[in-house]
Image: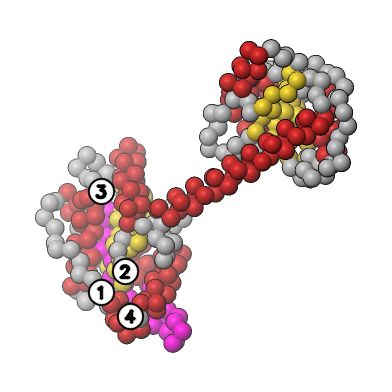
Amino acid sequence: MGGKPAGRVSENAGLAEGVKILIADDDSASRKLLAGTLQRLGYDVTEAAEGTEAWEVLRGEGAPRLAIIDWMMPGMDGVEICRRLRTLTDRPYIYTLLLSARERTEDVVEGLGAGADDYLSKPFNAHELEARLRAGKRILDLVDLLTSARERLQLQATHDSLTGLLNRGAILERLEQEVDRARREHLHVAVLMGDLDHFKTINDEHGHLIGDTVLRQVSLRLRATVRPYDVVGRYGGEEFLILAPGCDRSDALALAERIRLSIVKEPFEIPQGAIAMTMSLGATAAEITGRVDPDSLLRVADAALYRAKRKGRNCVEVAPAGEVFSEDTQAPAESG
C-alpha cells in the first residue's frame, strides 16, 4: 500500500502547528512516510496500525478532528470506520480523508457515500495532501462556528436573559420530562414555587434597574442552594420554580427552608447600600403515578405558596400528603 510522495512539502510548514491528526495505515513504511510529511507541516500526529485501533482512537475523548484512513486494513477497513463515525452525533465532527490505491469512480463514490469527506490516491502528492488538509481544517472551523451559533441560539431560546435561569417555557418542559422519568422509575418529584415578598416596592422605590440587580443576586443564591441535579427556572417576574427529583415531602420542606434562609440571611447589595428581602415558598411532592401530572403538581405548589403568603410571608408551606391528587385547590398566589 506504500509509495513515495510526489513533490516536496511546501514552505508553509508549521502553519498547522498543534493540530491533531490521525494516520491509520497497516503498511508501516507508508504510515511513517505520511507521518513525517505531516510532522514537518506542524501537525500533532497519532498513528494506528489497524482499523480497530483507529476506531478506538476516534471514538475516544479528545480524538483528533482530522483523520487520514487507509481503505484496506485488518480489523476494520476505512470505509467501515467512516460509516461508524457518521453515527457519532454527540461529539465534535471529525473530517476524514480516505487514502487508497483504488482509483475507480465507483470506489470513490463508495468511500464518499460511506461518510468520507475527501479521497486521496496513493502514492500521495505532498502538495495535494497539504491543500486537502487545509480545506478540511477550513470546513472544521466552519462547523465549529455553526455549532457555536446554534448553541447560543439554543441558550437564548431556553434561558431567561436577565437571570440566566431557565425561562418559563423551558422549566415547564423540564417538569414534564422529570415527571415522565419519575413515572417510569417509580420515583418522587418535588415542585417548589418561590415568590419574593413585596418585590413591587423595590421597583417603585428604587427603579427597575435595581430590581433587576436583586433578581440576578437572588438567582445566584438559588443556584448555590439547590443540589447540582435540581432545576431552577424563572417562572414569572419575581417568581421562581424549583424541581427536585427524588425528593419526598420532608425533603421538599427541608429544601424550601434552605432556600428561604438563603434569601433572608443577608441583605442584597445595591449601589445605594443594601436591601433586605424575604421569600415565601409553596411546595408539593409525590410519587409519580398515573394520577399525577405536571399540571397537578404546579397547581398544588401554587396553592401552597398562596397559603404561605396569607400566613404573613417569609415562610414555607408544604401541601399535605395526597393533596396533589385532589382537584380542589386554593386560588393562585398573589404577587409581591
**Which quarter of the image is occupied by the C terminus?**
bottom left
Q: Are marks 4 and 2 in contact (CB under 8 Å)?
A: no
**Which quarter of the image is occupied by the N terminus?**
top right
- The range drawn in magenta is 262-287
Residue wearing tag 2: 238
Q: CA distance from mark 1 to mark 4?
A: 10 Å
Asked if the magenta segment contains residue 277, the reply would be yes
Residue wearing tag 3: 294
Question: Is the residue 146 above or below the residue 121 in the image?
Answer: below
| Residue for point 30% across, 55% down | 191
Q: Are marks 1 and 3 in contact (CB under 8 Å)?
A: no
Which of discs 4 and 3 lies nearer the camera? The answer is 4
Residue 72 in the image: state x and y as whole percent: 72, 16
* N-terminal-most mark, 1 or 2: 2
Q: Are marks 2 and 3 in contact (CB under 8 Å)?
A: no
Q: Quadrant of residue 74?
A: top right
* N-terminal-most mark, 4 or 3: 4
Question: Is the residue 166 above or below the residue 81 in the image?
Answer: below
The amino acid on which the numbered mark 2 sits, given as a three-letter code, is: Glu
Q: Are marks 1 and 2 in contact (CB under 8 Å)?
A: yes
Q: CA distance from mark 1 to mark 3?
A: 25 Å
Residue wearing tag 4: 202
The amino acid on which the numbered mark 1 sits, given as a three-letter code, is: Gly
Q: Are marks 1 and 4 in contact (CB under 8 Å)?
A: no
Q: Which residue in the rendered view is the most extreme toward the left?
A: 328
Kindly tell me whether residue 62 is visible in this rendering. Answer: no
Q: CA distance from mark 1 to mark 2?
A: 8 Å
Q: Secondary structure at mark 4?
A: helix
